[in-house]
Image (cartoon, rainbow, N blue to C red):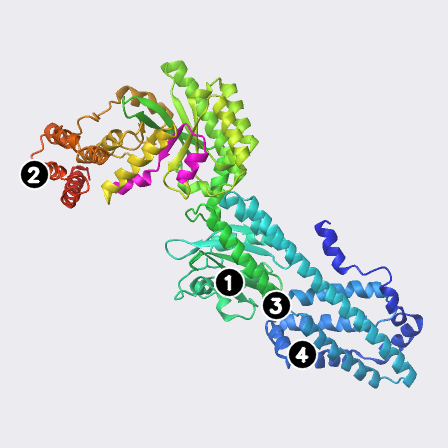
Amino acid sequence: MTREKLIATAVSPCRDYFADFASAYNEHVDSLLHQLLQRTTDEDIRAFVNSFYIQLSKRPKSAAILSRLSPEELENLKARQSEHLLLLLSSGSTPQKHYERALHVGRVHEMVGAGLPMLMEAYHLYHSRFEAILDAAALTSEERDILMGALRQRAQLDVEAQIASHAQLDIEIGLLQVALDEAIQRASNLADLLRDSLQALADLDGISACLFSRPDAHGVMQIEAEGGEEGRNYAESLRLKRAPLFETNAVSSAGTGPSGRAWRSGQIQVNDSFAVEATLHPWRQEAIKRGFRSSVAVPLLDESGQEFAILSLYSKWPGFFSAVNREAMLRHIQQTMSHAILRLDQASVIPVDLRHAYRQSLESGAVEMLYQPIVDLRTGKLDTLEALARLRGADGELIAPAAFLSAFGSSGLLRLFQLGLEQICRDVQVWRERSDFDVRVSLNLPPDGLTQDEYRDTVFEMLSQWKMPPNLLTLEILETKESIDISRRDARLAEFQKAGIEIAQDDLGSGHSSLVRMDRLASDRVKIDQALVRGTLKRPVRALEFIHHLTLLAQGFGAKVTVEGLEDEGLIEAAAILGADHGQGYGIARPMPTREVTPWMQSWSFPIDSSAPRTALGAMAGYLLWDHKLGTIADWPEFIEQFIKEPWLVHRYLSRAGNSDTELSMMLERTQIVALKGHGSAKYIQMRKELIDRLGEIWLSERPN
C-alpha cells in the first residue's frame, strides 16, 4: 500500500457509515434548525463561545494550550469556534460535508496539541451548551427532543471525524520515522545524511523547517544544514544577523533560548509559543515573519551522553511539539540521528553558506590536483605520485580536503573523483610526451567507489580516453565503518586489479578494523597512517614498534608498505631501516602543482644509507631490530656471544656522526655486557630502556625546530 493510500485509509469510513447519521440531516431537522437559527442571535453565539472557553480555561490541559496563544490568536480561535458551532446548527448540510469539515477541525486540534481527552471534555461542554440554546428557543417538547437527538448525532459524527484526524497524524508520524530510518540507512556520508533526513522531517505536516547546527570554537552554533523552504530562509536570516545565531553560553541572550538550554542540559527543550515565551525575544520577530509559532531543540548525544549537535525543528502551530505522541517522535529522532551521525566520520564545523560556496566551486570545476612524491626507501627513486585534491576558492586560495570534503554528498564526491582523475590522466600524458618518464599516480577512491558502477565506468572511460596505461594508476581505499556489499566490493576490486590497476589500503592502523581489513581486502599496497608516525615525538620506541610489526604483517600478506608522515631525515631513516618499502612526507617533498613535479625529480637526491644511520632515531630503529634478533636466538646461547660482538647500527651511528656522546657510548657498552645474561634478564631490560630513552633524547635535540 502506498503512503497516500495508507494515510487516506485512516480517514475513509466504510460505504454504509454515513447512513447511520442520515436521520440528523433530513428535511424536518433542517426546517427546525432553520427556525432555531432565526431565533438565535449573534450575541447568543458569542455567549456560547465565551462560556465554552471559560469552562475550558478551568481545566489544566485545556488552560495550558490556551496559554500558548497570543490575544490575536485566541480571538481567531474563538471566531473559528463560532463557525464550527454554526456548522453543527446549519441546515442544508450532509453527513459527508460535515465529516470533511470535522476532519479539518480535528487536524487543527491535533496540530496544537489538543489530544483526545481534551476533545472529549470539549464535547461534554458542547452538549451542555446545546441544551442552553434549545432551552432559550421557543420550541415544543417534541421539537426540542428531535433537535437534541440530531445535534447529539452530529456531535458524535464530529467527534469520530476528529478522532480519525488524530489517527491520520499518528500514521504520518510513523511513516516519518520509517522515512528517517531509510534515509539513515542509505547515507554513506554526513552531507547526504543531513540532506535526506532533514527533508524527511520537513515533509511532515506540522514541521515547517529544520536546522542542524554545531558550535564553533567560540560557542556559536553554526548552521550546517537546513530542511524545508522556510528552513533555508530562516538560516539565511540568521547568517545575515537579522536574528542572532544560537550560542551555548548561558550568559549571552543568544544562549538563553531552547538551543542553548538543550546544549547545556542535554535535554529536549520545547518552545510552545514564539509570541509568549520571554527568552525567545531575540528571534521572535524573524521567526513570526517566517510563520513559526513553536519550536523544539533536540540535542544529539554521543555514547557518553555528551552533546555534539543541536537539531532545531519549527512549526506554524503553537504547541505542536507538546502533544503526547510528539514526545515519542522526538525521542526517536534524537536517538536515530545521534547514532547515525556518530557512525559517520566526524568533520569540522562548516557553516551552511560555506557549504554552498564549496559546492558551487565543485560544480564550476574549480578543482586542482597537487602531487606528493612517494619514494622507494631502498633505492631512493620516485615510485608514485599521490594526487591530492584542492578547491580553488573565490579569493584564489587553495582549500584542503579537510575543510570541504564533508560538505559533499555522494554526487559531489563522484564529481570530485571524476574531475581529479581527468586531470591526472592529462598530466600523465604530458609527462610521458614531454619528459619521457612513466610514473604511477595514486588517487583516493571513496567507499561508494567499491559498489557504485559510476566510479568503475569513470575509471575505465578516462583511462581509455587519455590512453593512460592502467598499471600507472593506484586507487587508495579509505578505511570506513560503513557496511557494504562484501561480494560486490570484492568483485569490483578484482575487476580493477585484473585490468592492471593497483589497490592500496590507506591509513592502516588508524581505524577500527585494520587487521581484519588487511586479511579480507585484497590489496597490492598498504599505507601506515601518519598519526602513528607523529607518535614518535612522545613515545618514539612505541611508534617504531608499531611501524615494524605492521610492516612485517602487511608484507606477510604480500603487500608493499608505505609509511606516511616522514617529516625529517630521522623518520625517513627509521622507516627504511625497519623494512618499509616506500616513504612519503614533508621530509621528502610537500604536495606540489603539476609544473613543479619534473624540476623536483631532477633535483631530488636520497639522503639515506640504512646500513649507517646518521640520526639517533635511525640508530634506535636499528637497535630495535637487533633486540628482536637477540630474542629469537635466546634458546641458542652459543650464538649469543658472537652476535653481541658484531657491530650494531648504534655503533655505526656514533662512528658516522662523529658523535662524542660519552653517556651513550657507555650505555652501549653496558648493554652489550648485560645482554650476555639473556634477553629476558632484569638487568638487560633496564639497560634496554635506558639506552632507548637516551637515543630518544638525542633525536629530539637533533630535530630542527
Q: Amino acid at mark 3?
A: Val
Quarter of the image for residue 553 reads top left
Q: Earlier along the polypeptide chain: callout 4 or callout 1?
A: 4
Residues at badges 4 and 3 in contact (C-beta under 8 Å)? no
Residue under numbered circle 2? 666
Q: Residue 443, relative to residue 122: is it above or below?
A: above
Label 2, label 3: how far apart the Cα atoms are: 78 Å
- The magenta region covers 514-536
Q: Is residue 137 visible?
A: yes
Q: Earlier along the polypeptide chain: callout 2 or callout 3?
A: 3
Q: Nearer the viewer, mark 2 or mark 1?
A: 2
Q: Earlier along the polypeptide chain: callout 3 or callout 1?
A: 1
Q: Earlier along the polypeptide chain: callout 2 or callout 1?
A: 1
Q: Residue 467, relative to residue 408: is it above or below?
A: above
Label 4, label 3: how far apart the Cα atoms are: 19 Å
Q: Nearer the viewer, mark 4 or mark 1?
A: 4
Q: Decide which of 60, 367 is in the foreground and name it.
A: 60
The disc placed on residue 317 is none
x then y, percent, for residue 628: 23, 35
Quarter of the image for residue 533 reads top left
Label 3, label 1: how far apart the Cα atoms are: 26 Å
520 magenta-colored? yes
Residue under numbered circle 3? 324
Q: Amino acid at mark 4?
A: Leu
Query: Circle 3 — which element?
Result: helix
Residues at badges 2 and 3 in contact (C-beta under 8 Å)? no
Q: Residue 59, relative to residue 599: is it above or below?
A: below
The disc placed on residue 283 is 1
